[in-house]
Amino acid sequence: MDLHPKVIDLTLDRMWRLLENLGNPQNDLPAVIHIAGTNGKGSTQAMIRAGLEAAGKKVHAYTSPHLARFHERIRLAGALIDEDHLTEILDECYAKNGGETITYFEITTAAAILAMARTPADYTLLEVGLGGRLDATNVIDQPLLSIITPISIDHEQFLGNTLTKIAGEKAGIIKRRCPVIVAPQPEEAMDVIEATAERYHAQIIAQGQHWHIDTERDGLMFQDETGVVQLPRPNLPGDHQIENAGTAVAALRQLGFTDEVCEAAVSQAHWPARMQKLNTGPIIDSAAHAEIWLDGGHNPAAGQAIGHHLGTLSKRPTYLICGMLNTKDISGYLDPIAPHVEKLIAVSIPGEMNTLPAADTAAAARDAGMQAETADDVLRATREIVKNDPNARILICGSLYLAGNILRNHA
């Protein structure tokens, strides 16, 4: 963290310099699938990995941020990087950087690329950290496949304040003659993606044009230009996971995998803090009859997905325990959730410098039409809720940083 005064500083110059000093390991990665977008990147990646591993393939995966431990970011041939290997690879990158300016995300991404280049595998799943065009992961000349998940407004201070500008940054991962799988997009975002793909002669495989996914009785029906495949509903909760499943299946079919592999992708993925039901830990112990969920979504699109999902659940008084960063659109996030909630209890995110104060979160919740109060922490908030409503449904939400704190300390 001392190597750069800013946490985020989007440019590729420092990344190219360090990779050159490391011998350009990005050129030695197993076949790369590069994933950008605003929402659904992690879930889509998790589904693709589940499918590939079900097919017997060894898969590297890089994702961010981590929730409980940094090691979650780097998965080598199916297993999380171990402590000794991580220490060794970070030390090597630190030495090769030679004391030059570089951000935390850049040097740790370089370490991930170096570790993955030295470990045999069949595929590399590379998730963009922020944006795409100037993201530290955007150093692959010729990916096997690019994927763009749904784009919405987020990180405006870095990517621009319109969907057109944000889509331009996300579409920056599109490479010459590299096929790109495109999830459902707003029209203005799709226009940018299509123009970029045309410029680079990249084949687009887009939802609504080249593939479709729909619910059918108790399952899903996926259809593309090669045929139809019947699938179970995703094991990851929420109707928004249906479009993520479609994107993952479109990618796997583009790579030539079977219906059985596609079914495994949809039914065997694991991705924490995305409408994750908690079953153990101090929070559960303090609320024996409550139903407790955890979600790390934090932008208006995530709020819409959560609101929709809450509307599909069985009737039960629902409470939020919410903590957010001060860089997020809290009103845009809370407005679609508010109609489904009895009360919100606001908390500050422990140990997070950029947390929105609990009082500000509570004020925003009142503006959205909710009853709201504050608590010192999640455990106290849970106890307050179940004291008055032992059978409550409680959703802990608002930030991946809050979710990570829960998974480290309470789950």
Image (cartoon, rainbow, N blue to C red):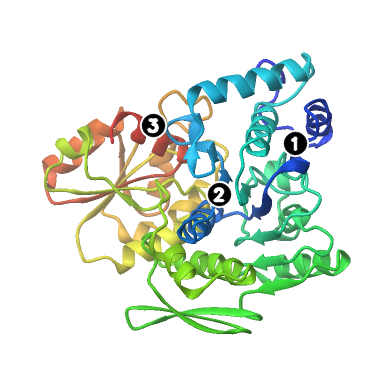
Question: How much space separates mark 1 and mark 2, taking CA atoms?
Answer: 17 Å
Q: Front-most of 115 and 70? A: 115
Residue labelled with disc 3: 405
Pinpoint residue 158: horizontal percent, then vertical percent.
71, 42
Residue labelled with disc 1: 25
- At horizontal 70% and vertical 26% (from top left) the residue drawn is 103
Q: Is residue 210 above or below residue 197?
A: below
**Badge 3: few (under 14), some or many (20 or more) residues near its Cα, within 10 Å?**
some
Pinpoint residue 369: horizontal percent, then vertical percent.
37, 54
Chain-order first, disc 1 or disc 2: 1
Name the side, left or right, on which 116 lies relative to 263. right
Instruction: Locate residue 363: give its quadrant.
Output: top left
Give the amino acid at mark 3: Asn
Chain-order first, disc 3 or disc 2: 2
Residue labelled with disc 2: 59
Q: Secondary structure at mark 2?
A: strand
Give the amino acid at mark 1: Pro
The quadrant in which the C terminus is found is: top left
- Comparing labels 3 and 2, the label whose residue is closer to the camera: 2
